[in-house]
Amino acid sequence: MNQTELNKYRAVLDAKQTELSAGLRNREDIAIEKTPDALDEVQLAGERELAIRNLDRESNLLRNVKGALGRIADGGYGVCLHCEEDIKPKRLEAVPWTKYCIRCQEASDRHEFVVDTGEGMDELLLNAA
């Protein structure tokens, strides 16, 4: 992959990171609200659950985007983390933050191998402290 292509992917990933970071700062939708009406509380609880799921999904996506930016920095971008084959440009165009080629992604979706969380043991221990 040449430098021009890497710069294009870096720009896309930087924009996505900025978009996701801004969205994750808004956590007002997950606040617990009390109302005198039980039906309203059930509806608010459902909306809060949906907001939490969206926040979780966007947090995971942000983690993947940051991982892709890290792989660009260390020279490993565009290489499948499982089989170490080059990821096809068409897949990178569709999902620039992908860690896996399409074959390994499908295997991962079927739980045929353990998915790398992208965090090393040292980072996990630091986050746990």
Image: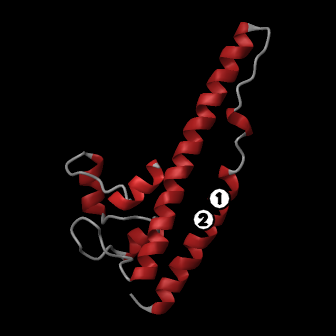
The x, y position of residue 5, in whole percent, is: 48, 85
Is 88 rendered above or below residue 124?
below
Question: Residue flagged by tag 2: what amino acid is it?
Answer: Gln
State which quarter of the image contains the N terminus: bottom left
Q: Secondary structure at mark 2?
A: helix
Q: Quadrant of residue 79?
A: bottom left
Distance in Å between CA atoms under marks 2 and 1: 6 Å
Does residue 52 appear left or right of residue 80 in this picture? right
**Residue located at (70% from left, 57% from top):** 22
Q: Answer yes or no: do the residues labelled 2 and 1 have beta carbons within 8 Å?
A: yes
**Label annotation for residue 17:** 2
Does residue 85 appear left or right of residue 33 in this picture? left
Q: How many marks?
A: 2
The x, y position of residue 24, in whole percent, is: 65, 50
**Label annotation for residue 21:** 1
Q: Secondary structure at mark 1?
A: helix
The x, y position of residue 70, in whole percent, is: 45, 73
The x, y position of residue 65, in whole percent, is: 50, 64
Question: Residue flagged by tag 1: what amino acid is it?
Answer: Ser
Is 125 rendered above or below residue 56?
below
